[in-house]
Every structure is written in C-alpha cells, then in structure tokens.
Amino acid sequence: MKTPKLFVVTTALACLAGIFMGCKNDQGKSAEVDSPAQQENSAMKKDSFGTTPEGKQIGQYTLQNEQGMEVKIITYGGRITSLKVPDRQGNYEDVVLGFNSLEQYVEENPFFGAIIGRYGNRIAKGKFSLDGQEYTLARNNGENHLHGGIKGFDNGIWKVQDASNQNSLTLSYISEHLEEGYPGRLETVVTYTLNDDNSLDVEYEATTDRKTIVNLTQHSYFNLSGDFSKKILDHEVRINADRFVPVNDSLIPTGELDSVADTPFDFRKPKTLGKEINAAHEQLKIANGYDHTWVLNEQDSGMRFAASAVHPESGRRLEVFTTEPGMQLYTGNFLDGTLPLQHGDGYYEKRSGFCFETQHYPDSPNQEDFPSVVLEPGEKYSSKTSFRFSVEE
C-alpha cells in the first residue's frame, strides 16, 4: 500500500536567500562566526565550547524558560549537549547523554545530540537513483550509508542565524552539491524553541537547487532518570503505531511493513523497554535490541502524538509529537562502556540511553512503496517535532 509523500511546500528558492547571505568558509559552507548585529542583539547566554582541529571556534548557546528548564546547544553539529528538566520533587537534572569537551564530539561517537542529515538512518549499499542517474554515497556502516556519511550534518559547523531571545535558536548549514555524494546544493535551517510549558520544538526547513533526497532528524539519547550510570530498561514506553519496519541482517528494510500485534514491537499500550527486549524474536536478534522504525498512525493529520516515555521513579515524562511518518526507537545497543560519562565517574554502558528519532523510513530512496524523500527545486522541505516534558505524581 502506498504511504504519504514527503511533506513539501512549493516556494521560491529566493525565500531563504536572505538567511544564507553572510559568512561562509572556503568551501561555501556555513561558518560559525556570528555577525556583529547578531552578537549585539543576542539575549541568549553564549559560551565558547572550544576550537576544532581546523581552528574553527565553536559556540555553546543556553536556552532557558520561565519554569527553569535549560537546554544547551553547540554549533558543532547543532548538537544538544545538555537538557535539564525537573523530577516530581522539583530537582532539575540532565536527561540527555553527552560529553564535556569538543574533542570528544569531534572524535568518532554515536551521534550524541546531533542534527542528522542529509539522510537519517541507512541507505542500502550507499547507492540510490534519481531520474535514472545513480548516486554513490560514503559507506560508513559496513556496506551501507548511515546518517549522512563520514562527514554528515553532525560534523558540520552550523551558523547562528538568530539568537535574539533566550528561548529560541536558529541555525543554518549549507551542504554543497555532491557533499558525501548527494546531488544538489541543500540549504538547511533548524530552529530550536524552548517553550514555557517545558516543550522543546525542533523545526526543519530545507531547499535545493536540483533534485535530491532529504531526511532530517534529531539524535539525542534520553535517560529520564538523570543518572547515566543506570540503564533505561525500566522506562515505560508507548508508541502510536500499528506497524513497524522489519530489517535484514544489515539493518536494511525488507520492504514489508509488519503488524506489531503479538510481537515485542507492540507498544500501543505502555510497557517497560526491558519487558521483551531480550525475547526470542528474530528482529531483536538482528539489531541486538530495538533499532527499528515504527510506522506512525494518522499520517495525514499533521502534527500528532508519536510516542511517550516515563521514568516511574523520578516521575519524569517525555511525549513526542511530530509531522513525520515514522520514528526510530533505538535502545543504545551499541554503547559499549568505552565512552566516559558527562557527569560523574564511569562510562556509557549498553542501553544507558534511548533515542526517539522522528523521520522517514530507512532506505526510502530504494523502496518504491515507502513515503517519498525526494525534494525538488522550488519546493521546501518542512518538518517539525516537539519533545514535551512533564511530571507524573
């Protein structure tokens, strides 16, 4: 059965021209330097987060709301490095996995907190075709392409477009034609907004000068306990999906969309992540746990509920709303105890964080019956996800 096409809005490419006029580096990509007007008008707290090996300065911006919630974002990869929310006792703790230094983000890592592009998730054998022309992408996940390649958006230096108030940050990045093998010069804008109801909105827009593919997402790892030495298996999760996307041995979709009924993939009613994660199910064996896309319900209704997670002990609750057709639940199966904790002593162990990655389905460019990820010149890619935090008494 055909599923909905990628949501695009026809527009003139010139609508973003003003946004992308400004500092560029020698390769034409967005530079990290703010204009004097942006620096002068910024009401947001800004700190230095270090210097890349190429000598580029990276800034860290702190979003705050009236409730006391706080989010820190760096211009390297547009990454969320810290997100502090209250528990039922009113104690604010960080609930996303991260690092203390830029050097750790520059080194190979599991995409902590990053904006992912041009294509979130996997593309089989790093190849796809548009109008009969084959494009070859970097293979950085075995024989497949993953999360934009060797130098995806997670490693790009994002330009600050707007930091004029303390609760919203707009970043932009220009991906040149054939960067990591993708066709078209893609201009991307991502806006983080921290609202006073303790929701964090992430809005994505992109335009291209030639036909291409786009699938953007946010790759924060959550642990609502606030203690990253603990595993997330006690989190109670609900996913608004009747079907999921099964994968083969290399985590590429088989092309089927299977029912979650009578499987460990049925989260239509809340259950703990640990309840069936070790069940004798072939899909769990392949991925070493949950690392799959769920086919979200009500795909024609725009922004709607996708998933929730609750940590019973702390009372922290996360709800996700999105315009996207799918969501990847990843349970940190490949964290291996080698990366140091951001807070305290110790290391990030297997399943010490989970991801709710709202997105289109994996390998969509090669799957005719999946929602389209094609973006044409004159169209605008538009997507929104909201992470809403609250407390259960």
Image: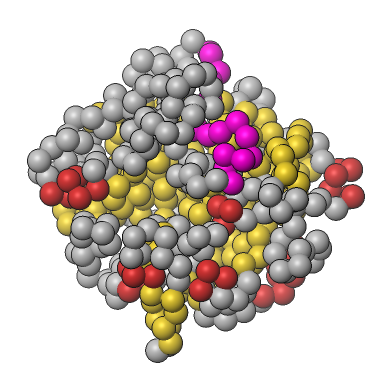
* Of the pair 386 and 220, the residue shown nearer to us: 220
Q: Is residue 104 magenta?
A: yes
- Residue found 51% across the figure and 54% down from its top: 116
Q: What stretch is highlighted in magenta?
A: 90-106
Q: Tell me: 12 left or right of 330.
A: right
Q: Tell me: 2 left or right of 50.
A: left
Q: Tell me: 55 left or right of 281.
A: right
Q: Where is residue 266 in the image (x, y as percent from the top left)?
A: 19, 42
Q: Does the magenta stretch include residue 350?
A: no
Residue 7, above or below 378? above
Residue 8 in view (yes/no): no
Residue 172, above or below 332? below
Q: Position of residue 182 (x, y in %)?
A: 51, 73
Q: Tell me: 66 left or right of 222.
A: right
- Residue found 62% across the figure and 67% down from its top: 175
Residue 41, above or below 134? above
Q: Which residue lies furthest to the top in this view?
A: 89
Residue 269, above or below 77? above
- Residue found 28% across the figure and 28% down from its top: 233
- Residue found 20% across the figure and 60% down from its top: 248
Q: Position of residue 92 (x, y in %)?
A: 55, 18
Q: Quadrant of the C terminus?
A: top left
